[in-house]
Amino acid sequence: MDFELTAEQAQIADTARKIGARFGLDYWLDHDRRKAYPKEIWQALCEAGLAGASLPEEHGGGGLGMLELALIIENVAAEGAGGTFAQVFMLNPIFGGVAIARYGNAAMKREWLPKLCAGQMYFCMGLTEPDAGTNTLEVRSFAAPDGNGWRLNGRKIWITGVPEADKMLVVARTKKIEEVQRKTDGLTMFMIDVKREGLTHAAIEKLGTNTLASSNVYFDNVRIEGSELIGTLHGGWNELLDVLNTERIVTTAGCVASGRLATRLAVEYAKERKVFRGTPIGAYQGIQFPLAQAHAELECARLMNYKAATLHDQGKPFGSEANTAKLIAAQAASTLIERAMQTMGGMGFARESHLERLYRDARLFKFAPVSEEMILNFIAQHDLGLPRSY
Ligand SMILES: Cc1cc2nc3c(=O)[nH]c(=O)nc-3n(C[C@H](O)[C@H](O)[C@H](O)COP(=O)(O)OP(=O)(O)OC[C@H]3O[C@@H](n4cnc5c(N)ncnc54)[C@H](O)[C@@H]3O)c2cc1C
């Protein structure tokens, strides 16, 4: 067991941190206010070769692993973005990149992956449906055969990054749910154009993560070409899980970044702010202990995430570690942000303190992309061997 980063990993982390610092907190304050996609900082990461770090070298990526990707996200996002920037990594190198690199055809890999790595192509993923939230197997959007392709009808909800995306990874049924013996049968992934006849979308008003729109998406007889199939027709379930599993590591890295950022802001403030007798408020244990407690939890989650990423990169099972890390990271980050706000008193409530943005954004990661409850279900079943309760 070696807890040291290699020289290359340390350099990657440092490059990511410097890019994050170059854009800083005010960049995110401004983009959050304007509800603007953070394209400029994404472009900077692309130019530094970091956006596609975990994708194959032969298609423009860095040929590195999830550990390096986690380090990049954590370090770039801790300088100003917080957890929401991890979503941009989810959309592009994970939903776009992992899906194409592992299950796409040769033309997709050759033409789309280099554009993804260069920031010339953006992605989103349409999985969640109004009547199939956590229970993904209830997805009903249906792609019916149509010549050498399909016609897609149905609806998705909460789909992030649609207005800017060129391509959408769509999960649809290709066999009616009523006609299959196992619900895992008959699910298929496609990578389709967002700008296509019959596909419409409308952003949902929401609490936070303002830089990325989350939308209702409607498919009205949308044509899917035969060449847009990703992976195995009717057999996409396990392939989908393979794509989704890595998103936990990415989410945790974002939560670690949020927690680190909130801690830094709180500590800087608490060292300066004097309220009684010239003592900085940071000297009071009432201020210190809650921050220290959540910091300790976040550090454990960070280490567990590195373990999950390392196991992934070694081709070993990593589900328990990735789920555990995500559970604790989302909780510890939320607590740190809450306590940082308490530390700043009224200032924490002001937009310019940046905490109110982190506070709004962090709430998402307690139930998405996987909820606390579903992680506890996973741990109870897989790690403790208890019966499935649902
Ligand atoms: C801002 C935002 C962005 C998103 N982006 C995307 C995206 O880009 N693409 C996409 O496909 N989806 C996206 N989602 C959807 C997200 O993944 C889902 O919201 C999430 O999976 C939860 O599903 P749900 O909202 O339908 O909740 P539900 O499934 O309705 O669950 C509601 C509550 O019940 C609990 N619950 C359900 N079943 C059980 C059980 N068996 N045991 C215990 N508790 C249970 C859940 O944990 C949750 O707390 C996004 C959501 C949001 C809010």
Image (cartoon, rainbow, N blue to C red):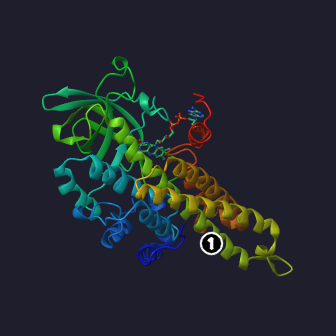
Q: Position of residue 285 (x, y in %)?
A: 81, 69
Looking at the rendered structure, the number of numbered marks drawn on it comes to 1
Foreground residue among 220 and 253: 253
Secondary structure, mark 1, is helix
Side of 5 where 324 appears, left or right: right
Q: Which residue lies most toward the bottom here?
A: 278
Identify the residue at the far left of this view. 147
**Percent position (x, y) of residue 119?**
29, 63
Q: Residues within 10 Å of mark 1 (few under 14, many from 20)?
A: some
Residue at the disc numbered 1: 264
Please name whichever residue, 67 or 342, is drawn nearer the observer in this view of the structure. Answer: 67
What is the quadrant of the N terminus in the image? bottom right
Q: Nearer the viewer, residue 41 or 329?
A: 329
Residue lying at 48% horizontally and 32% vertically, measured from the top left: 135
Q: Is residue 356 left or right of residue 232?
A: right
198 vs 324, nearest the viewer: 324
Q: Residue furthest right?
A: 277
Q: Is residue 166 visible?
A: no
Residue 259 visible at all: yes
Q: Position of residue 139 (x, y in %)?
A: 39, 30
Q: Is residue 1 above or below residue 210?
A: below
User: Which residue is found at the position 21% from the left and 41% from the top?
Assistant: 228
Q: Residue at x 31, y 64 (%)?
A: 63
The relative height of residue 260 versus residue 158 in the rendered view (above or below) is below
- What's under tag 1, amino acid-wise? Arg
Can you say which quadrant of the picture contains the C terminus?
Answer: top right
Quarter-of-image position of residue 375: top right
- Please name the residue shown 17% across and 37% down the image: 226
Please determine whether, in this image, residue 167 is positioned above or below residue 128. Answer: below
Q: Quadrant of residue 130?
A: top left
Residue lying farthest to the front in this orientation: 1
Q: Tell me residue 152's x, y (percent).
A: 26, 31
